[in-house]
Protein backbone atom coordinates (compact mmCIF):
# COMPACT_ATOMS: atom_id res chain seq x y z
CA UNK A 1 0.00 0.00 0.00
CA UNK A 2 1.18 3.51 -0.70
CA UNK A 3 1.06 5.31 2.61
CA UNK A 4 -1.00 8.47 2.05
CA UNK A 5 0.58 10.22 5.00
CA UNK A 6 3.09 13.00 5.27
CA UNK A 7 5.16 12.75 8.41
CA UNK A 8 4.10 15.43 10.89
CA UNK A 9 7.51 17.14 11.03
CA UNK A 10 7.39 17.63 7.25
CA UNK A 11 4.05 19.45 7.19
CA UNK A 12 3.72 23.25 7.01
CA UNK A 13 1.74 23.13 10.27
CA UNK A 14 4.65 21.70 12.31
CA UNK A 15 6.91 24.79 12.35
CA UNK A 16 3.84 26.96 12.82
CA UNK A 17 2.95 24.95 15.90
CA UNK A 18 6.50 25.27 17.13
CA UNK A 19 6.40 29.04 16.71
CA UNK A 20 2.97 29.18 18.34
CA UNK A 21 4.27 27.13 21.26
CA UNK A 22 7.26 29.44 21.70
CA UNK A 23 5.16 32.58 21.50
CA UNK A 24 2.06 31.55 23.43
CA UNK A 25 1.91 27.88 24.27
CA UNK A 26 4.76 27.86 26.74
CA UNK A 27 3.31 30.67 28.84
CA UNK A 28 -0.34 29.70 28.42
CA UNK A 29 -2.40 30.37 31.55
CA UNK A 30 -5.74 28.67 31.94
CA UNK A 31 -7.24 31.31 34.19
CA UNK A 32 -6.43 34.00 31.64
CA UNK A 33 -7.94 31.91 28.87
CA UNK A 34 -11.19 31.52 30.81
CA UNK A 35 -11.22 35.22 31.66
CA UNK A 36 -10.77 36.12 28.00
CA UNK A 37 -13.43 33.75 26.70
CA UNK A 38 -16.69 33.32 28.58
CA UNK A 39 -17.70 30.51 26.24
CA UNK A 40 -14.51 28.55 26.66
CA UNK A 41 -16.29 25.61 28.30
CA UNK A 42 -18.73 25.17 25.43
CA UNK A 43 -16.18 26.05 22.75
CA UNK A 44 -13.84 23.38 24.03
CA UNK A 45 -16.37 20.67 24.84
CA UNK A 46 -17.23 17.94 22.40
CA UNK A 47 -20.09 15.51 22.28
CA UNK A 48 -19.46 12.22 20.55
CA UNK A 49 -21.92 9.34 20.66
CA UNK A 50 -22.42 8.35 24.32
CA UNK A 51 -19.35 10.28 25.48
CA UNK A 52 -19.11 13.94 26.41
CA UNK A 53 -15.69 15.50 26.85
CA UNK A 54 -14.74 18.83 28.38
CA UNK A 55 -11.39 19.82 26.91
CA UNK A 56 -11.51 23.38 28.23
CA UNK A 57 -9.07 22.71 31.06
CA UNK A 58 -6.33 21.91 28.57
CA UNK A 59 -3.45 24.17 27.62
CA UNK A 60 -4.75 25.26 24.27
CA UNK A 61 -6.61 28.10 22.63
CA UNK A 62 -8.46 28.52 19.36
CA UNK A 63 -5.23 29.03 17.44
CA UNK A 64 -3.69 25.88 18.93
CA UNK A 65 -6.73 23.89 17.97
CA UNK A 66 -6.75 25.39 14.47
CA UNK A 67 -3.08 24.60 13.89
CA UNK A 68 -3.40 21.10 15.31
CA UNK A 69 -6.37 20.42 13.05
CA UNK A 70 -4.36 21.77 10.13
CA UNK A 71 -1.62 19.33 11.13
CA UNK A 72 -4.11 16.47 11.05
CA UNK A 73 -5.21 17.49 7.56
CA UNK A 74 -1.73 18.04 6.18
CA UNK A 75 -0.43 14.78 7.57
CA UNK A 76 -3.09 12.87 5.65
CA UNK A 77 -4.98 11.56 8.67
CA UNK A 78 -8.27 11.45 6.76
CA UNK A 79 -6.91 9.49 3.81
CA UNK A 80 -5.16 7.10 6.19
CA UNK A 81 -8.35 6.63 8.21
CA UNK A 82 -10.30 6.00 5.01
CA UNK A 83 -7.67 3.44 3.96
CA UNK A 84 -8.29 1.61 7.24
CA UNK A 85 -12.04 1.60 6.61
CA UNK A 86 -11.45 0.41 3.04
CA UNK A 87 -9.58 -2.64 4.34
CA UNK A 88 -6.22 -1.63 2.89
CA UNK A 89 -3.14 -3.19 4.53
CA UNK A 90 -2.23 -0.13 6.59
CA UNK A 91 -0.29 -2.31 9.03
CA UNK A 92 2.55 -2.15 6.56
CA UNK A 93 5.29 -3.95 8.48
CA UNK A 94 3.05 -7.02 8.67
CA UNK A 95 1.18 -6.29 5.43
CA UNK A 96 -2.20 -6.64 7.10
CA UNK A 97 -5.48 -4.81 7.05
CA UNK A 98 -6.69 -3.25 10.29
CA UNK A 99 -10.37 -3.98 10.68
CA UNK A 100 -11.32 -4.33 14.34
CA UNK A 101 -14.06 -1.79 13.52
CA UNK A 102 -15.67 -4.40 11.25
CA UNK A 103 -16.25 -6.62 14.29
CA UNK A 104 -18.93 -4.19 15.41
CA UNK A 105 -20.42 -3.33 12.01
CA UNK A 106 -24.06 -4.32 11.59
CA UNK A 107 -24.67 -7.24 9.27
CA UNK A 108 -27.11 -7.36 6.34
CA UNK A 109 -30.65 -6.83 7.54
CA UNK A 110 -29.53 -5.19 10.79
CA UNK A 111 -30.16 -1.56 11.57
CA UNK A 112 -27.33 0.63 10.34
CA UNK A 113 -26.07 -1.89 7.79
CA UNK A 114 -24.03 -0.28 5.05
CA UNK A 115 -23.12 -1.59 1.66
CA UNK A 116 -19.56 -2.95 2.10
CA UNK A 117 -16.92 -0.89 0.26
CA UNK A 118 -15.50 -3.91 -1.52
CA UNK A 119 -15.54 -7.67 -1.81
CA UNK A 120 -12.91 -8.24 0.86
CA UNK A 121 -14.96 -6.29 3.39
CA UNK A 122 -18.21 -7.98 2.33
CA UNK A 123 -16.68 -11.43 2.77
CA UNK A 124 -15.02 -10.51 6.03
CA UNK A 125 -18.28 -9.07 7.36
CA UNK A 126 -20.05 -12.34 6.59
CA UNK A 127 -17.32 -14.23 8.49
CA UNK A 128 -17.60 -11.80 11.39
CA UNK A 129 -21.31 -12.35 11.78
CA UNK A 130 -21.09 -16.06 11.41
CA UNK A 131 -18.51 -16.25 14.20
CA UNK A 132 -20.33 -13.70 16.32
CA UNK A 133 -23.57 -15.69 16.15
CA UNK A 134 -21.70 -18.90 16.98
CA UNK A 135 -19.89 -17.26 19.87
CA UNK A 136 -23.02 -15.76 21.33
CA UNK A 137 -24.80 -19.10 21.04
CA UNK A 138 -21.96 -20.72 22.98
CA UNK A 139 -22.09 -17.94 25.57
CA UNK A 140 -25.83 -18.40 26.05
CA UNK A 141 -25.34 -22.15 26.28
CA UNK A 142 -22.77 -21.72 29.05
CA UNK A 143 -25.00 -19.24 30.85
CA UNK A 144 -27.89 -21.68 30.76
CA UNK A 145 -25.75 -24.60 31.88
CA UNK A 146 -26.03 -24.72 35.65
CA UNK A 147 -23.29 -27.31 35.88
CA UNK A 148 -20.68 -24.75 34.83
CA UNK A 149 -19.89 -22.31 37.62
CA UNK A 150 -16.31 -21.26 36.83
CA UNK A 151 -14.88 -19.95 33.57
CA UNK A 152 -11.10 -19.70 33.43
CA UNK A 153 -9.75 -17.52 30.64
CA UNK A 154 -6.10 -18.25 29.90
CA UNK A 155 -4.53 -15.55 27.75
CA UNK A 156 -2.16 -12.60 28.00
CA UNK A 157 -1.86 -9.08 26.60
CA UNK A 158 -4.67 -8.47 24.15
CA UNK A 159 -6.12 -11.88 24.91
CA UNK A 160 -6.56 -10.91 28.55
CA UNK A 161 -6.61 -7.20 29.25
CA UNK A 162 -9.71 -6.26 27.24
CA UNK A 163 -11.99 -9.05 28.46
CA UNK A 164 -10.69 -8.77 32.04
CA UNK A 165 -11.35 -5.04 32.04
CA UNK A 166 -14.76 -5.36 30.36
CA UNK A 167 -16.02 -8.04 32.71
CA UNK A 168 -15.17 -5.80 35.66
CA UNK A 169 -16.65 -2.73 34.01
CA UNK A 170 -19.93 -4.52 33.33
CA UNK A 171 -20.17 -6.28 36.67
CA UNK A 172 -23.64 -4.82 37.19
CA UNK A 173 -24.81 -6.84 34.19
CA UNK A 174 -23.08 -10.09 34.99
CA UNK A 175 -24.62 -13.53 35.39
CA UNK A 176 -25.10 -14.11 39.10
CA UNK A 177 -23.90 -17.71 39.11
CA UNK A 178 -20.77 -17.62 36.96
CA UNK A 179 -17.35 -16.82 38.32
CA UNK A 180 -14.84 -15.57 35.75
CA UNK A 181 -11.13 -15.99 36.36
CA UNK A 182 -8.43 -14.46 34.20
CA UNK A 183 -5.05 -16.14 34.12
CA UNK A 184 -2.29 -14.35 32.27
CA UNK A 185 0.94 -14.53 34.19
CA UNK A 186 3.53 -17.22 33.67
CA UNK A 187 3.99 -17.08 37.45
CA UNK A 188 2.33 -20.30 38.56
CA UNK A 189 0.93 -18.55 41.60
CA UNK A 190 -1.89 -17.18 39.49
CA UNK A 191 -3.09 -20.41 37.88
CA UNK A 192 -2.25 -22.49 40.95
CA UNK A 193 -4.47 -20.37 43.17
CA UNK A 194 -7.42 -20.72 40.82
CA UNK A 195 -6.98 -24.44 40.25
CA UNK A 196 -7.02 -24.94 44.00
CA UNK A 197 -10.53 -23.50 44.14
CA UNK A 198 -12.29 -24.98 41.11
CA UNK A 199 -13.51 -28.45 40.14
CA UNK A 200 -13.03 -29.95 36.67
CA UNK A 201 -16.68 -30.87 36.19
CA UNK A 202 -17.89 -27.32 36.83
CA UNK A 203 -15.08 -25.47 35.05
CA UNK A 204 -14.79 -24.30 31.48
CA UNK A 205 -11.34 -23.28 30.23
CA UNK A 206 -11.03 -20.72 27.46
CA UNK A 207 -7.62 -20.76 25.83
CA UNK A 208 -7.37 -17.31 24.32
CA UNK A 209 -4.44 -16.63 22.05
CA UNK A 210 -4.44 -15.02 18.63
CA UNK A 211 -1.32 -16.94 17.62
CA UNK A 212 -1.72 -19.94 19.93
CA UNK A 213 2.04 -19.85 20.37
CA UNK A 214 2.51 -17.30 23.17
CA UNK A 215 4.80 -18.98 25.68
CA UNK A 216 2.99 -17.90 28.85
CA UNK A 217 -0.41 -18.89 27.56
CA UNK A 218 0.79 -22.21 26.23
CA UNK A 219 2.47 -23.08 29.53
CA UNK A 220 -0.67 -22.18 31.46
CA UNK A 221 -2.93 -23.99 28.97
CA UNK A 222 -0.87 -27.18 29.16
CA UNK A 223 -0.79 -26.96 32.95
CA UNK A 224 -4.59 -26.57 33.04
CA UNK A 225 -4.98 -29.51 30.70
CA UNK A 226 -2.67 -31.66 32.83
CA UNK A 227 -4.59 -30.69 35.96
CA UNK A 228 -7.89 -31.50 34.24
CA UNK A 229 -6.70 -34.92 33.15
CA UNK A 230 -5.19 -35.62 36.58
CA UNK A 231 -8.52 -34.82 38.25
CA UNK A 232 -10.76 -37.23 36.41
CA UNK A 233 -10.89 -35.54 33.01
CA UNK A 234 -10.47 -37.60 29.89
CA UNK A 235 -9.00 -36.92 26.44
CA UNK A 236 -11.70 -39.24 24.97
CA UNK A 237 -14.34 -37.26 23.14
CA UNK A 238 -17.26 -39.36 24.30
CA UNK A 239 -16.24 -39.40 27.97
CA UNK A 240 -18.50 -37.78 30.54
CA UNK A 241 -15.77 -35.41 31.70
CA UNK A 242 -14.11 -34.88 28.35
CA UNK A 243 -11.45 -32.35 27.56
CA UNK A 244 -13.31 -31.37 24.44
CA UNK A 245 -16.36 -30.30 26.47
CA UNK A 246 -14.36 -28.29 29.00
CA UNK A 247 -11.86 -26.47 26.78
CA UNK A 248 -12.63 -23.90 24.10
CA UNK A 249 -10.00 -22.16 21.98
CA UNK A 250 -10.24 -18.55 20.85
CA UNK A 251 -7.63 -18.11 18.16
CA UNK A 252 -6.68 -17.43 14.56
CA UNK A 253 -4.53 -20.58 14.62
CA UNK A 254 -7.14 -23.31 14.22
CA UNK A 255 -4.52 -25.96 13.51
CA UNK A 256 -2.61 -25.45 16.75
CA UNK A 257 -5.85 -25.47 18.75
CA UNK A 258 -6.85 -28.78 17.23
CA UNK A 259 -3.39 -30.22 17.92
CA UNK A 260 -3.87 -29.23 21.55
CA UNK A 261 -6.97 -31.46 21.56
CA UNK A 262 -9.61 -28.78 21.45
CA UNK A 263 -12.69 -29.40 19.31
CA UNK A 264 -14.53 -26.15 19.81
CA UNK A 265 -12.64 -23.25 18.35
CA UNK A 266 -13.91 -19.77 17.71
CA UNK A 267 -11.72 -18.15 15.14
CA UNK A 268 -10.78 -14.65 14.16
CA UNK A 269 -8.52 -13.10 11.56
CA UNK A 270 -5.08 -11.62 11.16
CA UNK A 271 -6.64 -8.23 10.55
CA UNK A 272 -7.66 -8.03 14.22
CA UNK A 273 -4.73 -6.80 16.31
CA UNK A 274 -4.41 -8.52 19.69
CA UNK A 275 -4.97 -5.31 21.63
CA UNK A 276 -8.01 -4.53 19.48
CA UNK A 277 -9.57 -7.96 19.82
CA UNK A 278 -12.06 -7.83 22.67
CA UNK A 279 -14.86 -7.45 20.10
CA UNK A 280 -13.94 -10.75 18.43
CA UNK A 281 -14.03 -14.35 19.69
CA UNK A 282 -11.61 -13.12 22.36
CA UNK A 283 -14.70 -11.47 23.86
CA UNK A 284 -16.31 -14.81 24.74
CA UNK A 285 -15.72 -14.36 28.49
CA UNK A 286 -17.45 -10.98 28.25
CA UNK A 287 -20.39 -12.55 26.44
CA UNK A 288 -20.61 -15.31 29.03
CA UNK A 289 -20.60 -12.73 31.79
CA UNK A 290 -23.14 -10.28 30.34
CA UNK A 291 -25.10 -12.32 27.78
CA UNK A 292 -25.65 -12.01 24.05
CA UNK A 293 -27.96 -9.04 24.12
CA UNK A 294 -25.64 -6.94 26.25
CA UNK A 295 -22.65 -7.98 24.12
CA UNK A 296 -24.47 -6.77 21.02
CA UNK A 297 -25.26 -3.57 22.79
CA UNK A 298 -21.54 -3.09 23.54
CA UNK A 299 -20.82 -3.57 19.83
CA UNK A 300 -23.53 -1.02 18.96
CA UNK A 301 -21.92 1.60 21.18
CA UNK A 302 -18.52 0.98 19.60
CA UNK A 303 -20.02 1.14 16.12
CA UNK A 304 -21.62 4.51 16.91
CA UNK A 305 -18.13 5.77 17.80
CA UNK A 306 -16.69 4.26 14.61
CA UNK A 307 -19.20 6.23 12.60
CA UNK A 308 -18.36 9.41 14.48
CA UNK A 309 -14.65 8.91 13.85
CA UNK A 310 -15.30 8.15 10.22
CA UNK A 311 -17.64 11.01 9.43
CA UNK A 312 -17.45 13.89 11.92
CA UNK A 313 -15.45 16.91 10.71
CA UNK A 314 -11.99 16.94 12.24
CA UNK A 315 -12.83 19.98 14.40
CA UNK A 316 -15.69 18.06 16.07
CA UNK A 317 -14.14 14.65 15.93
CA UNK A 318 -13.45 13.62 19.51
CA UNK A 319 -10.88 10.86 18.88
CA UNK A 320 -9.03 13.17 16.48
CA UNK A 321 -9.03 16.10 18.88
CA UNK A 322 -7.83 13.91 21.75
CA UNK A 323 -5.10 12.45 19.56
CA UNK A 324 -4.02 15.95 18.56
CA UNK A 325 -3.86 16.99 22.19
CA UNK A 326 -1.52 14.06 22.80
CA UNK A 327 0.73 15.34 20.01
CA UNK A 328 0.62 18.89 21.39
CA UNK A 329 1.56 17.76 24.89
CA UNK A 330 4.17 15.22 23.91
CA UNK A 331 5.96 17.04 21.12
CA UNK A 332 5.61 20.70 22.02
CA UNK A 333 5.11 20.87 25.80
CA UNK A 334 7.35 17.84 26.26
CA UNK A 335 5.06 16.13 28.80
CA UNK A 336 6.13 12.54 29.13
CA UNK A 337 3.08 10.88 30.64
CA UNK A 338 -0.68 10.99 30.94
CA UNK A 339 -2.62 9.76 33.92
CA UNK A 340 -5.97 8.00 33.59
CA UNK A 341 -8.34 8.65 36.47
CA UNK A 342 -11.64 6.85 36.03
CA UNK A 343 -13.98 7.95 38.81
CA UNK A 344 -15.70 4.63 38.47
CA UNK A 345 -14.86 1.44 40.29
CA UNK A 346 -16.04 -0.49 37.23
CA UNK A 347 -13.31 1.09 35.12
CA UNK A 348 -10.54 0.12 37.55
CA UNK A 349 -8.69 -1.95 34.95
CA UNK A 350 -8.98 0.70 32.24
CA UNK A 351 -5.50 2.15 32.94
CA UNK A 352 -3.90 -1.29 32.52
CA UNK A 353 -5.85 -1.88 29.33
CA UNK A 354 -4.84 1.51 27.95
CA UNK A 355 -1.22 0.85 28.75
CA UNK A 356 -1.22 -1.87 26.16
CA UNK A 357 -3.53 -0.11 23.74
CA UNK A 358 -1.56 3.11 23.68
CA UNK A 359 2.00 2.17 24.49
CA UNK A 360 2.16 -1.01 22.43
CA UNK A 361 0.51 0.80 19.52
CA UNK A 362 2.36 4.07 19.63
CA UNK A 363 5.53 3.41 21.59
CA UNK A 364 7.63 3.41 18.43
CA UNK A 365 10.94 5.04 17.56
CA UNK A 366 10.82 4.66 13.79
CA UNK A 367 8.28 5.74 11.21
CA UNK A 368 6.33 3.32 9.06
CA UNK A 369 9.24 3.20 6.59
CA UNK A 370 11.68 2.32 9.35
CA UNK A 371 13.40 5.73 9.56
CA UNK A 372 14.38 6.87 13.04
CA UNK A 373 12.03 9.55 14.34
CA UNK A 374 13.41 12.86 15.50
CA UNK A 375 10.48 13.37 17.90
CA UNK A 376 8.77 11.57 20.77
CA UNK A 377 5.74 9.31 20.44
CA UNK A 378 3.49 7.63 23.03
CA UNK A 379 3.49 9.12 26.49
CA UNK A 380 3.64 6.80 29.47
CA UNK A 381 0.08 5.88 30.41
CA UNK A 382 -0.65 5.18 34.03
CA UNK A 383 -3.34 5.61 36.62
CA UNK A 384 -5.72 4.24 39.16
CA UNK A 385 -9.40 4.81 39.75
CA UNK A 386 -10.47 7.85 41.72
CA UNK A 387 -10.77 8.42 44.55
CA UNK A 388 -8.02 5.88 45.33
CA UNK A 389 -5.41 7.76 43.29
CA UNK A 390 -6.02 10.89 45.35
CA UNK A 391 -4.73 9.11 48.40
CA UNK A 392 -1.69 7.80 46.64
CA UNK A 393 -0.02 9.75 43.85
CA UNK A 394 -2.14 12.85 43.30
CA UNK A 395 0.29 14.67 45.60
CA UNK A 396 2.80 14.52 42.77
CA UNK A 397 0.31 15.60 40.13
CA UNK A 398 -0.64 18.67 42.17
CA UNK A 399 2.72 19.76 43.47
CA UNK A 400 5.48 17.78 41.79
CA UNK A 401 7.73 19.54 39.29
CA UNK A 402 6.38 17.61 36.28
CA UNK A 403 3.15 18.41 34.53
CA UNK A 404 1.02 15.30 34.03
CA UNK A 405 -2.17 15.80 32.03
CA UNK A 406 -4.96 13.88 33.73
CA UNK A 407 -7.94 12.24 32.10
CA UNK A 408 -10.97 12.13 34.36
CA UNK A 409 -13.79 9.80 33.43
CA UNK A 410 -17.03 10.14 35.35
CA UNK A 411 -20.57 8.85 35.11
CA UNK A 412 -23.71 10.93 35.37
CA UNK A 413 -25.52 8.07 37.03
CA UNK A 414 -23.85 5.76 39.49
CA UNK A 415 -24.57 2.07 39.27
CA UNK A 416 -25.47 1.23 42.85
CA UNK A 417 -28.16 1.69 45.47
CA UNK A 418 -26.05 3.67 47.91
CA UNK A 419 -27.40 7.18 47.38
CA UNK A 420 -24.68 9.07 49.21
CA UNK A 421 -21.79 7.60 47.28
CA UNK A 422 -22.20 8.88 43.76
CA UNK A 423 -22.44 12.59 44.58
CA UNK A 424 -19.41 12.19 46.81
CA UNK A 425 -17.49 10.50 43.98
CA UNK A 426 -18.46 13.19 41.45
CA UNK A 427 -17.61 15.99 43.85
CA UNK A 428 -14.16 14.52 44.24
CA UNK A 429 -13.61 14.20 40.51
CA UNK A 430 -14.69 17.79 39.94
CA UNK A 431 -12.62 19.01 42.86
CA UNK A 432 -9.45 17.37 41.60
CA UNK A 433 -9.82 18.80 38.11
CA UNK A 434 -10.60 22.19 39.59
CA UNK A 435 -7.69 22.10 42.03
CA UNK A 436 -5.28 21.13 39.29
CA UNK A 437 -6.42 24.05 37.19
CA UNK A 438 -6.85 26.85 39.70
CA UNK A 439 -4.18 25.85 42.20
CA UNK A 440 -4.09 28.01 45.29
CA UNK A 441 -3.42 31.61 44.32
CA UNK A 442 -1.07 33.40 46.66
CA UNK A 443 0.14 30.21 48.28
CA UNK A 444 3.77 29.55 49.06
CA UNK A 445 6.01 27.03 50.75
CA UNK A 446 4.46 23.65 51.46
CA UNK A 447 0.99 24.81 50.67
CA UNK A 448 2.00 26.09 47.23
CA UNK A 449 -0.33 24.78 44.55
CA UNK A 450 0.84 26.12 41.19
CA UNK A 451 -2.36 25.30 39.29
CA UNK A 452 -2.51 25.57 35.50
CA UNK A 453 -2.27 21.78 35.35
CA UNK A 454 -4.24 20.40 32.43
CA UNK A 455 -6.98 17.79 32.44
CA UNK A 456 -9.70 16.42 30.23
CA UNK A 457 -13.01 15.49 31.80
CA UNK A 458 -15.10 12.84 30.09
CA UNK A 459 -18.63 11.92 31.08
CA UNK A 460 -20.72 8.88 30.20
CA UNK A 461 -24.38 8.78 31.18
CA UNK A 462 -23.84 5.45 32.88
CA UNK A 463 -21.54 2.47 32.68
CA UNK A 464 -23.71 0.23 30.55
CA UNK A 465 -22.52 -2.00 27.70
CA UNK A 466 -23.32 0.55 25.02
CA UNK A 467 -21.51 3.49 26.63
CA UNK A 468 -18.63 1.26 27.60
CA UNK A 469 -18.28 0.08 23.98
CA UNK A 470 -18.27 3.67 22.77
CA UNK A 471 -15.62 4.67 25.32
CA UNK A 472 -13.23 1.90 24.32
CA UNK A 473 -13.70 2.56 20.61
CA UNK A 474 -13.01 6.23 21.32
CA UNK A 475 -9.64 5.27 22.80
CA UNK A 476 -8.84 2.98 19.89
CA UNK A 477 -9.43 5.76 17.38
CA UNK A 478 -7.59 8.32 19.45
CA UNK A 479 -4.54 6.07 19.35
CA UNK A 480 -5.06 5.75 15.61
CA UNK A 481 -5.17 9.54 15.26
CA UNK A 482 -1.97 10.29 17.18
CA UNK A 483 -0.18 7.32 15.61
CA UNK A 484 -1.25 8.45 12.14
CA UNK A 485 0.17 11.91 12.76
CA UNK A 486 3.40 10.53 14.17
CA UNK A 487 3.78 8.58 10.93
CA UNK A 488 4.22 5.24 12.66
CA UNK A 489 2.70 1.79 12.26
CA UNK A 490 0.42 1.62 15.29
CA UNK A 491 -0.52 -1.98 14.59
CA UNK A 492 2.73 -3.90 14.93
CA UNK A 493 4.75 -4.66 18.10
CA UNK A 494 8.26 -5.65 17.13
CA UNK A 495 9.55 -4.33 20.43
CA UNK A 496 8.21 -7.34 22.32
CA UNK A 497 10.19 -9.87 20.29
CA UNK A 498 13.74 -9.59 21.61
CA UNK A 499 12.81 -10.36 25.20
CA UNK A 500 10.92 -13.46 24.08
CA UNK A 501 13.94 -14.77 22.18
CA UNK A 502 16.30 -14.09 25.07
CA UNK A 503 13.95 -15.76 27.57
CA UNK A 504 13.98 -18.89 25.46
CA UNK A 505 17.76 -18.89 25.48
CA UNK A 506 18.02 -18.17 29.20
CA UNK A 507 15.60 -20.77 30.51
CA UNK A 508 17.97 -23.75 30.06
CA UNK A 509 20.78 -21.73 31.62
CA UNK A 510 18.74 -21.43 34.83
CA UNK A 511 19.16 -25.16 35.24
CA UNK A 512 22.79 -25.40 34.13
CA UNK A 513 23.88 -22.14 35.72
CA UNK A 514 26.33 -21.74 32.88
CA UNK A 515 26.08 -18.08 31.97
CA UNK A 516 29.72 -17.31 31.39
CA UNK A 517 29.21 -16.27 27.78
CA UNK A 518 26.59 -13.70 28.85
CA UNK A 519 27.02 -10.12 29.95
CA UNK A 520 28.41 -9.92 33.52
CA UNK A 521 25.17 -8.65 35.10
CA UNK A 522 22.95 -11.37 33.64
CA UNK A 523 25.62 -13.98 34.45
CA UNK A 524 25.86 -12.68 38.03
CA UNK A 525 22.09 -12.86 38.48
CA UNK A 526 21.98 -16.38 37.08
CA UNK A 527 24.63 -17.44 39.62
CA UNK A 528 22.75 -15.72 42.45
CA UNK A 529 19.45 -17.39 41.49
CA UNK A 530 21.21 -20.75 41.44
CA UNK A 531 22.20 -20.51 45.07
CA UNK A 532 19.73 -22.06 47.51
CA UNK A 533 17.17 -19.56 48.82
CA UNK A 534 17.86 -18.41 52.37
CA UNK A 535 15.71 -19.81 55.16
CA UNK A 536 14.87 -17.76 58.23
CA UNK A 537 16.48 -14.42 59.15
O1 LIG B 1 -3.05 -13.52 21.70
P1 LIG B 1 -1.63 -13.94 21.64
O2 LIG B 1 -1.19 -14.36 20.27
O3 LIG B 1 -1.35 -15.02 22.66
O4 LIG B 1 -0.76 -12.70 22.02
C1 LIG B 1 -0.80 -12.13 23.27
C2 LIG B 1 0.02 -10.85 23.34
O5 LIG B 1 1.39 -11.16 23.26
C3 LIG B 1 2.25 -10.55 22.33
O6 LIG B 1 3.56 -10.68 22.76
C4 LIG B 1 1.96 -9.13 21.99
O7 LIG B 1 2.84 -8.22 22.57
C5 LIG B 1 0.55 -8.69 22.32
O8 LIG B 1 0.16 -7.74 21.38
C6 LIG B 1 -0.42 -9.82 22.33
O9 LIG B 1 -1.70 -9.35 22.64
Image (cartoon, rainbow, N blue to C red):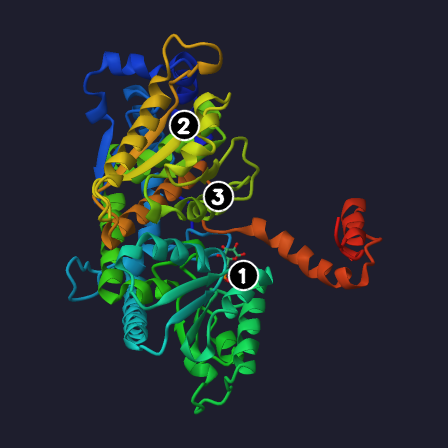
Picture coordinates of residue 425, whole percent (x, y): 29, 36
Q: Nearer the viewer, residue 458 or 535?
A: 535
Q: CA distance from mark 1 to mark 2?
A: 40 Å
Tell us which disc is closer to us: 3 or 1.
1
Tag 3's secondary structure? helix
Dot placed on the residue nearer the N-terminal end, 3 or 1: 1
| Label 2 crowd (10 A; few <14 / some 14-19 / many >=20) | many
Tag 2's secondary structure? helix
The residue depicted at 50 percent of the width and 81 percent of the height is 261
What residue is shown with label 3? 359
Q: Nearer the viewer, residue 11 or 43?
A: 43
Picture coordinates of residue 317, whole percent (x, y): 26, 37
| Residue sitting farthest toward the front | 537
Picture coordinates of residue 441, whole percent (x, y): 36, 10
Q: Nearer the viewer, residue 228 or 321?
A: 228
Q: CA distance from mark 3 to mark 1?
A: 25 Å
Tag 1's secondary structure? helix
What residue is shown with label 1? 190
| Label 3 crowd (10 A; few <14 / some 14-19 / many >=20) | some
| Label of residue 328 in the image | 2
The residue depicted at 83 percent of the width and 53 percent of the height is 517
Quick check: 347 above or below 105?
Answer: above
Q: CA distance from mark 2 to mark 3?
A: 17 Å
Amino acid sequence: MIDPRTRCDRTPAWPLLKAHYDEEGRGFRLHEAFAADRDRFSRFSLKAPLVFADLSKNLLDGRTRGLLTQLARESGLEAYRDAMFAGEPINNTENRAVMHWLLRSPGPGEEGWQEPANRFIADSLADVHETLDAMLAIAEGVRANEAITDIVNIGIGGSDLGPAMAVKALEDFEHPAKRLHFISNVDGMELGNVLRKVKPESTLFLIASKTFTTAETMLNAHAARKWFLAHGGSPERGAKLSLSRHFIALTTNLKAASEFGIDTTLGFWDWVGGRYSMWSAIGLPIAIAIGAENFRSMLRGAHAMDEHFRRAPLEENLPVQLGLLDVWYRNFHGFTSRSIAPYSHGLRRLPAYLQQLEMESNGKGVDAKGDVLPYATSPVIWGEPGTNGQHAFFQMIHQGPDTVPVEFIALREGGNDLPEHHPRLLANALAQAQALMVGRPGSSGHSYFPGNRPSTFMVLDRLDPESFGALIALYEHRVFASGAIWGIDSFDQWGVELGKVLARELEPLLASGDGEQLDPSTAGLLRYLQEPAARGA
